[in-house]
Image (tube, rainbow, N blue to C red):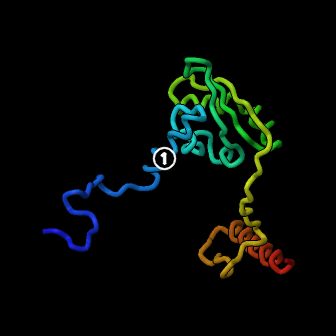
Amino acid sequence: MKNSNSPIPEDRRKRYGKARTLGKCLNHLVEPICKKQGFVNASVVLDWPQIVGQSFADLCQIIKVTFPFNSRLDGCLHMNTTSSMAAVLAYEEPLILEKINRYYGYQAISQLKIFHGLKPTKKKPVQDVAEMTISSPIQIEGITYEPLKEALANLGQYIQKAKKRD
């Protein structure tokens, strides 16, 4: 039974399997670009926050990886970061190299080359205790330990005073 609404005849339609998530397709799309930049595979770029941790990933960006001629060992990872983070990266270089090589599974990277110039993205600052809103007063009626009950009451009063000052 043919579907008359379809522009392509049924015998010429191809099915490519089930629907896939964007994350699974992204590796296939990014792979050729990453290979031009010297990366062994694109998953290093995509998994950068999991490799070095979110705190480093927010403040540094991978530019490219270079290897010696005819070798995939002892490469150099080029990174872009802020000036203040460059000193931290230089200090943490052995730890970062260990994490990257653990990800690759062999001694792929032996050197970091750090460039200054990354513009940090503005993150939403963590709320201060004085900025937090309290919908109801702290419930301390069910607490029997008096020092804890007193400390919580003092904390509630401190927060209320801080809110009034602002």
Residue 66 in the image: state x and y as whole percent: 63, 27
Query: Please, is residue 91 above or below residue 147 in the view?
Result: above
Does 130 sit left or right of 141 as displayed? right
Does 119 sit left or right of 42 as displayed? right
Quadrant of the image containing the N terminus: bottom left
Residue drawn at (73%, 30%) of the image? 113
Quadrant of the image containing the C terminus: bottom right
* Label 1 Cα neighbours within 10 Å, binned few <14 / some 14-19 / many ≥20: few
Does 5 sit left or right of 151 as displayed? left
Query: Please, is residue 141 above or below residue 20 in the view?
Result: below
Query: Please, is residue 3 above or below residue 96 in the view?
Result: below
How many callouts does the rendering have? 1
Residue 50 in the image: state x and y as whole percent: 56, 43
- The picture quadrant where one finds residue 160 is bottom right
- The picture quadrant where one finds residue 132 is bottom right
Residue 2 in the image: state x and y as whole percent: 16, 68
Q: Secondary structure at mark 1?
A: helix
Residue 115 in the image: state x and y as whole percent: 77, 37
Q: Amino acid at mark 1?
A: Leu
Residue drawn at (66%, 31%) of the image? 77
- The picture quadrant where one finds residue 140 is bottom right
The residue lying toward the viewer, choosing from 75 and 54, is: 75
Residue drawn at (87%, 78%) of the image? 165
Write down the residue under mark 1. 29
